Structure formats: structure tokens, C-alpha cells
Amino acid sequence: MNFLKWPLTTLLLFVAVNTMMFNRVEAQSFVEGVDYVQIRGIPEAKSPIVREFFSYNCGHCYRQDSLFEKTVELLGDKVEFSRTPIGAGRPSWILSQEAYYLAQKFKLTPQVHGNIFKRIHEKEGAFTRPEQLRDYFVQQGVSADKVEKAMSSADASLALSNYDTQAQLAGIRGVPSLLVNGRYLIKSKHRTAEELAELVSYLSSLEDKE
């Protein structure tokens, strides 16, 4: 096909139509109800953002953690990433919520996040007593007094309450779950990190549907 013989207006129209067709194909590559569902939503301080609902006690969360880490790397600075630990009313899961709170409180999350998963699933099992949680963070270099004070603080109670509220508002029924912009819940299915990053990018760019 010789584009050089086309009039300029015809060529521009051809490019415009093909661009529209390409964008339509891209938009149709993810389907509401199949790849994601829209929920009533939770308020997010920042946007675009993807939030992972998880538990250190969840074996599937442990196995998926490296996938999510790679997805976050692929997204780079385009999308904020945050986590919400789930308690589900189970004592050991609530202690894992506290573990995440303490990691955030003492700015140790990059250091301990993967190690807490390994501790639970490869070594000593779940935290079952507050003393175990205290001792774990003492091993990370935090004084026992500071850990105990943080665990019994009003801030800790508020943080755990906020975690539970976020999970309830998002309608989380299982973990791990990913929520984009507080509005779009990704439906669980096997994806590569590249596919997941593409879906997150797509959802993060959607305008709110009222």
C-alpha cells in the first residue's frame, strides 16, 4: 500500500481511525465482571494507588508475594503501592496485623516483610502470643520497652481498626486481593507480573463511574 500517493486529509483520517480502533481494542482487553469488579469503594489519600489486602498467615499470600513485588517494580512511580493486613477475627491473624503495624511504626517493613512470611511458613509458624511478636522485633534491633509501648498504644488499636474497616468497605472475601484507586477490585486469576501491571495501569487510569 503506497501511502505517499494519498492526499494529506485522507492519510490523517486513516491514522485517526486506526488509532481509535487500537485504543478500543486496548480498552476491551479488560472486561468488567471478568477481570475486575467495581465496588462502592474506600477513600484513598493518594491516587493512582493499588492496595494489597493480605495476611502473613496466608499461604497463598506468601506464594504470591514475589509476583506482587515484581509487579510493583514494573509499575515504578506510576502507581502508589500500599498494603492492608487482614485479621479475620482470628487471634494469630490479628497478631500478624500487629506485626505489619510494628514494621511500619519502626520503619522496618523493607527489612522484615519477606522474613515474616518465611518465619511463619518455613520456620517457626504463626505468632500465637504477643511475647513472640515482641521478641521478634527485639531481634530486629528495637528495644523491648519500645515494642511493648507500641503494641499497647492507642495508635496500634486505631491502626488495626482502620485495617478492618478498609477490608469491610472493600468487601474482601479472601486474600490476597488487589484494589485499585479504592474502587476497582481485581478478580482472582493467574496472571504474570507483566499482565498484572498492565491491568493495574488500565484500572488506575479509569474515571470513576457513578
Image (tube, helix red, strand yellow):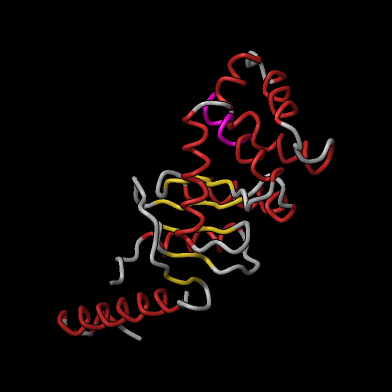
Of 58 and 111, the residue lying toward us: 58
Residue found at x 64% / y 36%:
113
Quadrant containing the N terminus is bottom left
Q: How many marks?
A: 0
102 is higher (above) or lower (below) than 29: above
Name, please, the residue furthest toward the right.
Answer: 123
Q: Indicate left or right for 1 with 75 as reference.
A: left
Q: Is residue 102 magenta?
A: yes
Q: Quadrant of residue 111?
A: top right
Q: Position of residue 173 (x, y in %)?
A: 59, 64
Residue extent of the magenta highlight: 99-106
Q: Position of residue 127 (x, y in %)?
A: 75, 37
Residue found at x 30% / y 66%:
208
Q: Is residue 107 shown to the viewer in this render?
A: no
Q: Is residue 59 magenta?
A: no
Magenta part mainly helix, strand or loop?
helix
130 is higher (above) or lower (below) than 39: above
Of 19 and 68, the residue lying toward us: 68
Q: Position of residue 70 (x, y in %)?
A: 59, 48
Q: Indicate left or right for 147 with 130 as reference.
A: left
60 is higher (above) or lower (below) than 36: above
Of 27 and 158, the residue lying toward us: 158
Q: Is residue 163 shown to the viewer in this render?
A: yes
